[in-house]
Image (cartoon, rainbow, N blue to C red):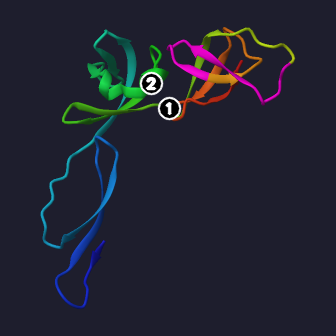
Amino acid sequence: YKRQPGKGGAFVRTKLKNVVSGKVVDRTYNAGAKIDIENVDRRDFTYLYNDGESFVFMDATDYDQINVPATVVGDAANFLLENQQVTIALNNGNPLYIDLPASVVLEITYTEPGLQGDRSSAGTKAATVETGYEIQVPLFLETGTKVKVDTRTGDYLGRVN
């Protein structure tokens, strides 16, 4: 927003977001300052596979494939299954980051045998889901159970029938 104090020239206070790191900073500029703005294009993609070096996604509109380095995918890899829908932010065709849905459904591929009848929320145990990621789940869940997982925190949100 533009301010015109009693003395001196007008200035502009603004919030800027770093598109790569996501960090937001406050900046003040003189009213006449020229600023270059980068465009960030957000598009929907479908996850296809991991070729060992990068993750391969297909653009939902034109079926073009892009390779996204593992460093850009980051923790999102813990929740990616084949055919998973994601939004990828691009700058001049370069992937900046991946936005996952708020939660995903994953199957437990391994966990210690459950204690039948133990429905208390007090205890949790480790469970490995089909992406290889490990989460904490209630004691009564068994291998093969489909669970809903929060993609921001990795928290167990409930069972899926």
Label 1 sits on residue:
101
Q: CA distance from mark 2 to mark 1?
A: 8 Å
Q: Earlier in the sequence, mark 2 or mark 1?
A: 2
**What crowding class fits label 2: few (fewer than 14 Cα within 10 Å), some (14-19), or many (20 or more)?**
some
Q: Position of residue 47 (x, y in %)?
A: 39, 18
What x and y, as percent, mark residue 130? 54, 12
The answer to whether 37 is drawn above or below residue 96 in the figure is: below
Please state if 16 lies on the left or on the right of 9 as rendered: right
Q: Which quarter of the figure has residue 43?
A: top left
Q: Amino acid at mark 2?
A: Gln
The label on residue 66 is: none
- Label 1 crowd (10 A; few <14 / some 14-19 / many >=20): some
Query: Which residues lie in the magenta part?
Result: 118-135
Q: Residue furthest right?
A: 117
Which type of secondary structure does the marked residue at label 2 adopt?
A: strand
C-beta proximity under 8 Å, tags 2 and 1? yes
Q: Which residue is mark 2?
A: 85
The C terminus - image quarter: top right
Residue at screen point 31% across, 57% down: 25
**Residue appearing at x 45%, y 16% in the figure:** 83
Q: What amino acid type should be assigned to the residue bearing mark 1?
A: Pro
